[in-house]
Amino acid sequence: MRKTSVIPLSRLNDSERSMPIEIHPPRQSWADDFASLKRVILRAAPAGALLHHIGSTAVPGLVAKDIIDIQVSVDALELVDRTAFEREGFESRSIVTDHCPPGLDLADGELRKLYFKSRGRPANIHVRERGRFNQRYPLLCRNFLRAHPTAAAAYGLIKQRLAGFFPDNADAYYDIKDPVFDIIMEGAYDWAKLTGWTEPPSD
């Protein structure tokens, strides 16, 4: 397999880069917001799609940006009707490749995704194919941090410090945060092997 290039900040467009980085204390309402968004997304998602609340707002007690991240797992990206998502209030974006951790040799298909942004309550919708590296990565990450509150707290502190240093520089924030998270994930991989972790059912 050929080496996949990392495209810095492929997740952000110009308007998002200009938004200030604000880290909020954990909120119980984030779980409720996910549940509300899930009901809407299911009307647009292909039959059999799995939905998971991912990212920092899915980890109890973890500080986060006030943006809900949701993963929609599908058998194939070609099954997704973008128009259906747009009808339900989600804006289709041009992002097609996730961050690739340094040193990994991944085929392009392991990192491809569709991406939608909510026009209402701030939310990012990541549509990924089942069994791909980028589909398993956020689920393992979430479950590892849920099971290791000390690691979650340390990660949260790093995010707060970065937001303090770079409140108006999203490029700098993610250029540091992403590699830090890749370090955390090394522990998550060991934990997954030790515990026999498997992909959780739909939330």
Image (cartoon, rainbow, N blue to C red):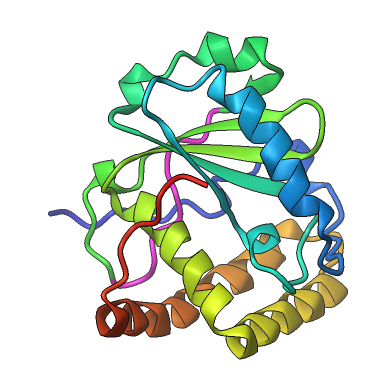
Identity of the residue furthest to the bottom in this view = 150
Residue 101 percent across, percent down from the top left: 39, 67
What range is drawn magenta here?
94-103
Residue occupying the point 35% across, 27% down: 77
Q: Which of the 4 quarters of the picture holds residue 3?
A: bottom left
Left or right of 146? Residue 189 is left
Left or right of 71? Residue 65 is right
Q: Which of 112 and 28 is in front in this view?
A: 28
- The answer to whether any part of residue 77 appears in the image is yes
| In magenta segment, residue 99 | yes
Identity of the residue furthest to the left in this view = 1
Q: Main secondary structure of the magenta part?
A: loop
Up-down relation of residue 120 to residue 198 (above or below): above
Residue occupying the point 68% across, 40% down: 35
Q: Which of the 4 quarters of the picture holds residue 175?
A: bottom right
Quadrant containing the N terminus is: bottom left
Residue occupying the point 55% across, 76% down: 145
Residue occupying the point 62% across, 71% down: 177
Up-down relation of residue 83 to residue 69 (above or below): above
Left or right of 146? Residue 173 is right
Q: Which of 149 and 11 is in front in this view?
A: 149
Residue 170 percent across, percent down from the top left: 73, 58
Q: Nearer the viewer, residue 30 or 165?
A: 30
| In magenta segment, residue 201 | no
Residue 69 percent across, percent down from the top left: 63, 47
- The answer to whether any part of residue 5 appears in the image is no
Up-down relation of residue 141 to residue 73 (above or below): below
